[in-house]
Amino acid sequence: PDAEPFVAGPVRRAKSLKSGREELMATDKAFHEWGRLVPEAVARLAGLGEGGGYCWRSLTVKGVERRLDGVLEPEEAGRPILFVEFQGYRDERFLLRWLQGIVTYLKEREEVEKIHVFVVYLSGGHEVEEALEYRTSAMGKIFLRFAPQSVVLNRVDPEELLQRLGVAAIPLLPLTCLGREELGRKAVGWAKMLGASSLGQEEKKSLTGLLGAFLSHRLQELSLEEIEDWLGGVKMEDTPLGQMLLERGLKKGREEGWKEGREEGREEGRISEARRMLFRALRRRLGEPSVRLEEWVRSRSSVEELEEILDTILEVSSMEELWERVASSS
């Protein structure tokens, strides 16, 4: 953890670049919500150990317009700033883009003593070992090797992760090395473990919803009702990220509204359902929207726009901040 993120050394050729993305997964929202809820667990996963609190931020760096998945800023002096990236598909160039975002972020800060960078890969097939970049100086070209530390979740032993992070690790356990049959046997116990923990009720509900979201990713053939049974009867609609399951078409009777518009006449249904889920999430997270905000949302005419607003709802902490974000983007 104390290693410098930029290491000078012999120039090595990066792996060949590939076009396209492999196994693109809709897990970003869930990972961001997990980081927001348990930033200390993220720090321990990255190897920073105990001591000192962290505040989770997810932001877009101006200038390069590069989104940083997670920036954990320490509450105590002397602790490193932690940059975290969740990677659910293979992208040979994502390290370079991430590096640009980090450098721009640091230029806007004063007196940054230490940083730590860490990648969470869903699968070994998504790994990118390093990125090379060069800068021109008075001494000629200076090459930088960017090789952050990382963890590959589908290679991790779930018991080891649980021992390391405590109950905060439970939502991630479906993504570990467990086989599908064993996963089904253990899921009920994980939900009970969360329910019996000393966490607050809202935190329990949020982490249980995340457990359901990642279960649905691993076991896509299950219905929403079956997953809710595994969670001890918890209704996913009542959790902050329950809409993620609906987006994946697991809820019978609502699937038609979330299909990707392959047949005519479905688009309006998708938009209507997206608005409904957006307002539900908004009221549960921030309260009743103002007339101005409600009219603005209803004026949006594409599912993509509404999904972006939903992402923003999960990132902000007040109705005022939400309005500032959506108004500035229109």
Image (cartoon, rainbow, N blue to C red):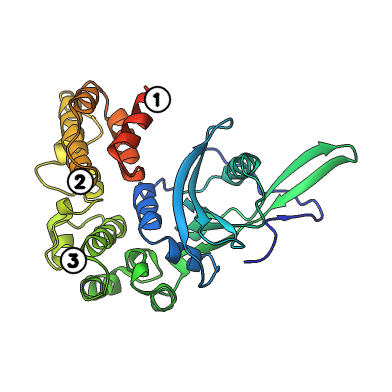
Q: Residue at x 45, y 45 (%)?
A: 58
Front residue of 267/264: it is 267
| Residue occupied by mark 1 | 328
Image coordinates of residue 206 in percent, x first then y, are: 26, 58
Q: Is residue 99 left or right of residue 178?
A: right
Give the residue type at disc 2: Leu
In percent of width and height, residue 8 lies at 79, 54
Q: CA distance from mark 3 to mark 2?
A: 16 Å
Question: Can you say which quadrant of the picture contains the N terminus?
Answer: bottom right
User: Mark 2 and 1 residues: CB-CB less than 8 Å, in contact?
Assistant: no
> How far, Cα to Cα, is label 2 from label 1?
29 Å
* Residue on which disc 2 sits: 246
Q: How far across and how far down the image is residue 107, in percent?
A: 65, 40
Q: Is residue 225 left or right of residue 123?
A: left
| Residue receiving disc 3 | 231
Q: Is residue 20 above or below residue 50?
A: above
